[in-house]
Amino acid sequence: MSKPILIVGGGPAGLAAAHAVASIGHRSVLVEKAEIFGGAPIQSGYAKLVPSGLWAKDAIGGMVRRVENNSQIDRKLNTVVKTFDGTPGNFVAELSDGTRVEAGSAILTTGFTHFDSVNKPEWGFGLFPDVVTTTQVEQMISSGKGVRCPSDNRKPKRVAILLCVGSRDRQIGREWCSKICCTVSANMAMEIREELPETHVYIYYMDIRTFGLYETDYYWKSQEEFKVKYIKARIAEVTSDGKQLIVKGEDTLVKRPITIPFDLVVHAIGMDPNVDNMTLSAVFGVDLHKQGFIARKDTYGVMGATSRDGVFVAGAAIGPETIDDSIAQANAAALNAIAAATGNNLQAAE
Amino acid sequence: MPIHEKSLIRPENITTHDELVIEGVDVSGHWSTFIESRVISDYNEAMEEEIAALPGGENIHRCWQCGSCTNSCTVHAIEPRFNPRYWIYLIRTGMESELLRDKDLIWKCVSCNKCTYACPRDVVPEGVMKATAHWLEMKGHVPESPSMTFDKIFTEQIVEHGKIEDTKVLMQFLKRTNQPLLQDWLKQIVWNIGMRTPVKWGLKSAWNFVFHPRTRGWKKAGAAIQDYIIEVEQHHKSALGVDKSTAANSNAQQHNLHAAE
């Protein structure tokens, strides 16, 4: 009998990988550093997911329960991997709880870290209570409290969603597009308009990237059915006149400076590399991408392979990723991880 | 530092002061030219919904600013300041003061509808232009246009009589637009028609002019049409927040440009 697969990170990708491994009768050890499974959608309290429209607690919650009810999966919460040595088929990992795990291979599904808006101080986060992040608005919606201004709990009449906060920003070293924020923001704008029909919602963008099939259901729908306004403008700063937030910028379509009052400003925050990636890189001996995410070995050969044989990666650990694609990558990585653990040769596509 | 976008500087925003001292520094004279800020900070949030409530404006929210309307526009070809894309944008973003700068241009749309066919989003810019011109009149930003005056006279006669009396329409139009009744071109037309009209028709016309008979059974139909016109007008007025007393006579200064505050 070959050794179990070590899966690091219990978010959507890790949960999918664990289930995939178990589904063909193979054992796995699922290690999660937080006290609950579910990753960002659960820990950060996301509301309705794109594109299913299901609440995160139901959609991802189902994935958690499926894993929790599976005897093939050895689950470890509040745990991290301290050391990881060996070769494919014969790895040994030492966990923070002192246990020693023998593993045939490993899958890193360690995800991302939300961009911290404090790193973009000119946009007012941390200075003004009514400047919030998409994550906070997700929590307002998912908790049932509704979208309110944190300063005095009033219903906002005018909401601005600023796209590309911590994405596509060379000034602060975030050169990547976080891929999902446009669609998430369009979806959020519709949710706000649904809850507060009198509220005007503006989305400030440099480009809209509601890629693939999201175009119709989010970009167009938000404009045609929910009358969300998209303004092509770069925001210079978010300040306050003491009563309302003042958004200053340049409207690049009409070529003029704009100064607009808002009640609530939402930062559509991007995906940073997981803050633990330097540690993960050292522990697992995997190379990082120059942007700080975990590097893939190649694109077309072995799905999810890293620079170290027998260690695979899936989901937002590789770079900004959607939940559904994270799950697909996790399934692919699971297949390759089992092959590596059972001594089968993974052939490069050369 | 050179000024790159000189075209964006409006002449009225360039100011010099014959005598001005700022914090002890003398900045008098032409070598201390000031360019006033172009920042817009007043917004009329309601403007898009108001124009969408008028006939033709319904699809304005679908605009994605591709500019096909302006590029295909007949008027834009000879008058570059005629820019439907820009106006739609100003309306959607509530930049009322900017829109009002062009209030004497917007009505120049010739309704050729090239924009309607060019528009990939079914905005019907021609309709939006019509609605915007209508909006400007209803809000009192521009005086009632001659065509609107004509339409009103025409409609009044239809509602009252079930048909128009051409001579009366023309006479009333000239009167209400403060034009003399006896104009050379008009005298010529009347003379030419008069000389060629059979006597019997001429008498019939004269009789119609004097008595202006009503179409048979028109009373009920006319009343129903009148009710409908009042209903639609009332709907438009309430959508724009203008009641009868202020509709025609108010001017731009009286209107609240600070709706966003």
Image (cartoon, coloured by chain):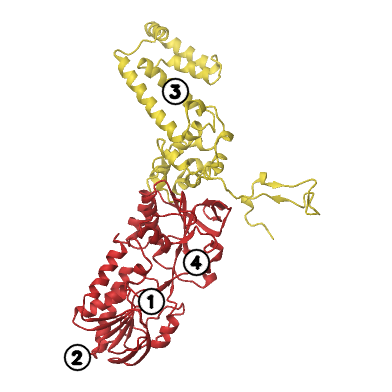
Crowding around mark 3 (Cα neighbors within 10 Å: few <14, some 14 to 19, many 20+) is some
**Residue at point 30% right, 65% down?**
A57
How far apart marks 3 and 4 lie (CA) works out to: 59 Å
- The mark closer to the camera, 2 or 3, is 2
Q: Name the residue beneath numbered marker 2.
A: A1
Crowding around mark 1 (Cα neighbors within 10 Å: few <14, some 14 to 19, many 20+) is many
Please say if the residues under marks 4 and 2 sit with CB atoms less than 8 Å apart. no
N-terminal of the two: label 1 or label 2?
A: 2
Q: Share a chain, discs 4 and 2?
A: yes
Q: Name the residue beneath numbered marker 3.
A: B152
Given residues A80 and A257, the one toward you in this image is A80
Q: Is residue A223 left or right of residue A128?
A: left
Please tell me the numbered disc located at residue A317: 1
How far apart marks 1 and 4 lie (CA) works out to: 20 Å
Q: Which residue type does callout 4 highlight?
A: Ser
**Residue at point 56% right, 43% down?**
B98
Chain bearing tag 1 is A
Element carrying mark 2 = loop
Chain bearing tag 3 is B
Q: Share a chain, discs 1 and 4?
A: yes
- As displayed, is residue B116 above or below residue B155? below
Is residue A114 visible to us here?
yes
Element carrying mark 4 = helix
Q: Name the residue beneath numbered marker 4.
A: A117
**Residue at point 38% right, 67% down?**
A44
Q: Quadrant of the N terminus of chain B?
A: bottom right
Residue B58 location, quadrant? top left
Q: Share a chain, discs 2 and 3?
A: no
